[in-house]
Image (cartoon, rainbow, N blue to C red):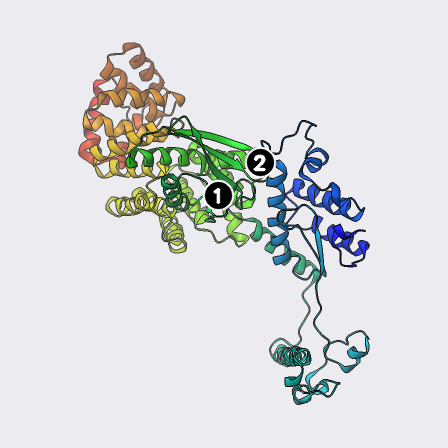
C-alpha cells in the first residue's frame, strides 16, 4: 500500500472490515450506486491502484460508460461522488459514530483517506504500562478525591508542561464522568429494586424492535430540493421564496450548491435559451437524471414570472408531481412518501379500495411514531370522506374525529398550507363555511404558488357564494396546470354557471367527460342544454336515469351542501329545464 492510500499504517484488513460495516448499514441500504462506488474506490486503493482513481476510469468501471465518455457533458461521477460524501457524513453522525476507522473521500479527489479514531484515555494506572483498560469501577473503588489530586508520573506540575496538563485534565474529566455514571447506575438499581422488585435487561427482541423503529423514523423523510448557485438572481429569489412553502418537500438553502456537488435529493438548474428565455431543469442528484424541464419566456413582468414559477413548481413539487412520480418509478419512496403518494392517488381518483389503502397506511405511520402534520391532515380529510361517502371504516368515524385530526395537523405545522387546507375541508363538510373560508384563506396566503391550494380556495369560495372570485382563482389554476384533478374543473363549472360565464361552463364541462359520476353527468347535462346540444343532453339524461343517487332523488339537498341555498335553487331549476326528472324515494 503506497502513500496514495493515506492509510497511516492502518491494517488493510481493518479497513476492509470498516468498509463492510458501511456497506451493510441502513444509511447505505437504499443507494446501490454509492455502495458500488465506495467499494471500488477503497479496493482499488488498497490494491495499490490509487493513481487509477480518476473520473474517466470510474465512469467506465463503475457506471458502465463507453470509451467516448466526456466528463464535461456527463456529470455522473461528480454527482455520485458528492452523494457518497454526504452519505458517509450521515453514516458517521449516526450508525457509525463509534467506528474505530473512518473512511472519507476529500473533495477534489477520489482517493480515500482512513483515520483511526482515538480512544478515551484509561483511568487506571495500569493503563500507563500498556495494559488493557479495566471496566469502569464502582465509585468507592476509585474515589473522586484521589483522581482530583493525582499528578502525572513525571512529577512535573501541570502548569509547567502543557502536554501533561492536557493528559491529566483529560483523565480528570473522564474520571469524574465515570464516577457520576457509576453513581447514577447505583441510584437506578436501588430505585428499580424499590419500585419494580428488580431491574430486568431489555429483551433482545425489544432491542431489535427499538432499532427497527428508529431506522423507520430516520427513513420517513421528505425529498429535499435545492437551487443551483448560478441560477438567475431574480428567479432564484422567487424560487427560494416559493419552494419552502410546499409541504411535500424540504428546501435546502445552500449557496454552495453546484452541478458538481449538489446537496439535496433534487436540484433546479436554469439554462439560457435564446437571448432572454430560460429553460428550468430538475435533476435527481444521485442518478444525475434530468427528470423534467420547463420554459420561462423572456421579457416577463414580476407577476408573470410568479405565474410561471407557480405553474412549474406545481408540476414538480406536490405529492403526485414529477418528483414523487420519479421516486415511485425508481423504487425510492420511503414509508412516509409512499403513504403520501397513496393518499394523493385516492383524492385524484376516488374509490373504496383506494380510500382503505390510504387510511391504513396513514394510521400505520402514526402507530410507528411518525408524528407528521401531513399524516394528520390526510387522516382528517379521509375521515370526512368516510362520513360523506358512507365508508364503514374506521368504524364509528364522525366529523368530530375529522376535526380533531385537522386541528392536530395545524398544531404541528401552523404555517403549513396543507394542514390549513385539510382543516378547511373538515369545517366546510361540517357546515362551518365562514370558519372554512378563514382556514383556506390562510392556506392560500401561506402558499400562493401551489395551484392545488388555489383550487381548494376556489372550491371554498363557491361554498360561501363568492362566485366571481372563485372564477378568477379557478380559471388561473386550471389554465396554469394542464394536467389536474377533475374536481378543479367541476368547481370552475359551478362558479362559472353562477356568474353567467357560459364559455367556461362549456369548457369545464367537457373536461368532466373523463368520469361517469352522477354530479359530473348533471354538469354536462346543463352545459348541453345551454349549448343546445340535443344529442349530448339526451345521452346525459339516459345515464342519469339509471343512477340511484342523491342527484336524482333530491338534487336540492345535494347542491345546498356545495353552495348557498339560493344558488342551489337556481342550479336545480336549470336541471329541471334540461329535462331531469326527480324520482320519488319509493320509485324503482
- Percent x, y for residue 84? 63, 46
- Percent x, y for residue 187? 62, 80
- Percent x, y for residue 275? 38, 27
Q: Residue at x 78, y 52 (%)?
A: 16
Horizontally, residue 318 falls left or right of residue 333, namely left
Place residue 472 in its image quadrant.
top left
Q: Which residue is mark 2?
A: 288
Horizontally, residue 384 falls left or right of residue 217, namely left
Can residue 585 be seen in this snapshot? no
| Disc sitting over residue 182 in the figure | none
**Crowding near the residue tagged with mark 1, few <14, some 14–19, many ≥20 C-alpha atoms within 10 Å:** many
Q: Which residue is mark 1?
A: 225
Give the distance between the C-alpha atoms of the residues marked 2 and 1, in whole angstroms. Answer: 14 Å
465 vs 384, nearest the viewer: 465
Can residue 62 be seen in this snapshot? yes
Residue lying furthest top: 535
Q: Residue at x 78, y 58 (%)?
A: 10
SS assignment at label 1: strand
Q: Is residue 164 above or below residue 23?
A: below
Q: Are marks 2 and 1 in contact (CB under 8 Å)?
A: no
Q: First in sequence: mark 2 or mark 1?
A: 1
482 vs 256, nearest the viewer: 256
SS assignment at label 2: loop
The quadrant the C terminus occupies is: top left
Q: Residue at x 31, y 31 (%)?
A: 300
Amino acid at each position: 500500500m503506497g502513500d496514495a492510500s493515506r492509510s497511516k499504517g492502518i491494517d488493510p484488513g481493518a479497513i476492509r472490515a470498516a468498509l463492510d460495516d458501511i456497506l451493510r448499514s441502513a444509511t447505505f441500504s437504499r443507494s446501490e450506486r454509492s455502495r458500488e462506488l465506495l467499494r471500488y474506490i477503497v479496493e482499488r486503493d488498497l490494491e495499490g491502484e490509487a493513481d487509477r482513481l480518476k473520473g474517466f476510469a470510474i465512469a467506465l468501471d463503475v457506471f458502465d460508460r463507453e470509451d467516448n465518455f466526456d466528463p464535461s457533458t456527463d456529470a455522473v461521477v461528480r454527482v455520485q461522488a458528492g452523494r457518497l460524501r454526504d452519505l458517509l457524513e450521515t453514516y458517521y453522525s449516526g450508525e457509525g459514530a463509534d467506528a474505530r476507522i473512518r473512511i472519507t473521500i476529500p473533495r477534489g479527489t477520489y482517493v480515500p483517506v482512513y483515520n483511526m479514531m482515538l480512544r478515551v484515555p484509561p483511568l487506571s494506572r495500569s493503563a500507563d504500562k500498556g495494559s488493557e483498560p479495566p471496566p469502569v469501577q464502582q465509585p468507592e473503588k476509585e474515589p473522586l478525591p484521589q483522581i482530583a489530586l493525582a499528578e502525572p508520573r513525571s512529577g512535573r506540575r501541570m502548569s509547567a508542561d502543557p502536554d501533561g496538563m492536557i493528559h491529566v485534565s483529560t483523565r480528570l474529566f473522564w474520571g469524574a464522568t465515570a464516577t457520576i455514571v457509576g453513581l447514577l447506575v447505583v441510584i437506578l438499581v436501588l430505585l428499580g429494586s424499590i419500585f419494580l422488585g428488580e431491574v430486568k435487561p431489555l429483551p433482545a427482541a425489544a432491542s431489535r424492535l427499538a432499532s427497527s423503529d428508529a431506522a423507520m423514523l430516520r427513513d420517513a423523510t421528505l425529498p429535499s430540493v435545492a437551487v443551483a448557485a448560478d441560477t438567475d438572481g431574480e428567479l432564484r429569489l422567487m424560487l427560494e421564496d416559493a419552494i419552502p412553502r410546499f409541504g411535500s418537500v424540504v428546501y435546502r438553502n445552500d449557496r454552495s450548491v453546484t452541478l458538481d456537488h449538489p446537496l439535496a435529493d433534487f436540484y433546479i438548474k436554469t439554462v439560457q435559451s435564446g437571448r432572454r428565455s430560460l429553460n428550468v431543469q430538475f435533476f435527481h442528484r444521485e442518478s444525475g437524471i434530468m427528470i423534467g424541464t420547463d420554459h420561462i419566456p423572456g421579457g416577463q413582468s414580476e407577476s408573470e414570472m410568479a405565474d410561471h414559477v407557480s405553474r412549474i413548481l406545481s408540476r414538480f413539487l406536490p405529492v403526485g408531481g414529477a418528483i414523487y412520480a420519479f421516486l415511485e418509478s425508481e423504487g425510492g419512496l420511503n414509508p412516509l412518501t409512499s403513504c403520501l403518494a397513496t393518499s394523493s392517488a385516492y383524492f385524484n381518483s376516488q374509490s373504496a379500495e383506494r380510500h382503505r389503502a390510504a387510511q391504513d397506511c396513514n394510521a400505520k405511520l402514526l402507530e410507528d411514531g411518525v408524528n407528521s402534520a401531513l399524516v394528520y391532515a390526510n387522516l382528517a380529510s379521509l375521515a370526512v370522506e368516510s362520513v360523506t361517502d358512507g365508508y364503514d371504516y374506521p368504524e364509528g368515524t364522525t366529523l368530530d374525529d375529522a376535526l380533531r385530526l385537522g386541528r392536530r395537523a395545524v398544531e404541528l405545522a401552523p404555517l403549513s398550507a396543507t394542514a390549513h387546507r385539510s382543516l378547511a375541508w373538515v369545517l366546510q363538510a361540517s357546515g362551518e363555511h365562514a370558519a372554512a373560508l378563514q382556514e383556506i384563506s390562510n392556506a392560500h396566503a401561506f402558499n400562493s404558488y401551489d395551484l392545488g391550494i388555489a383550487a381548494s380556495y376556489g372550491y371554498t369560495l363557491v361554498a360561501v357564494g363568492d362566485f366571481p372570485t372563485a372564477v378568477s382563482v379557478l380559471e388561473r389554476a386550471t389554465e396554469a396546470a394542464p394536467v389536474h384533478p377533475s374536481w378543479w374543473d367541476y368547481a370552475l363549472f359551478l362558479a362559472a354557471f353562477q356568474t353567467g360565464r357560459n364559455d367556461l361552463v362549456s369548457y369545464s364541462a367537457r373536461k368532466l367527460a373523463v368520469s361517469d359520476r352522477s354530479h359530473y353527468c348533471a354538469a354536462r347535462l346543463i352545459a348541453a342544454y345551454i349549448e343546445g346540444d340535443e344529442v349530448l343532453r339526451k345521452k346525459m339524461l339516459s345515464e342519469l336515469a339509471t343512477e340511484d343517487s342523491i342527484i336524482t332523488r333530491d338534487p336540492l339537498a345535494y347542491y345546498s351542501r356545495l353552495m348557498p341555498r339560493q344558488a342551489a335553487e337556481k342550479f336545480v331549476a336549470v336541471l329541471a329545464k334540461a329535462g331531469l326528472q326527480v324520482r320519488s324515494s319509493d320509485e324503482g
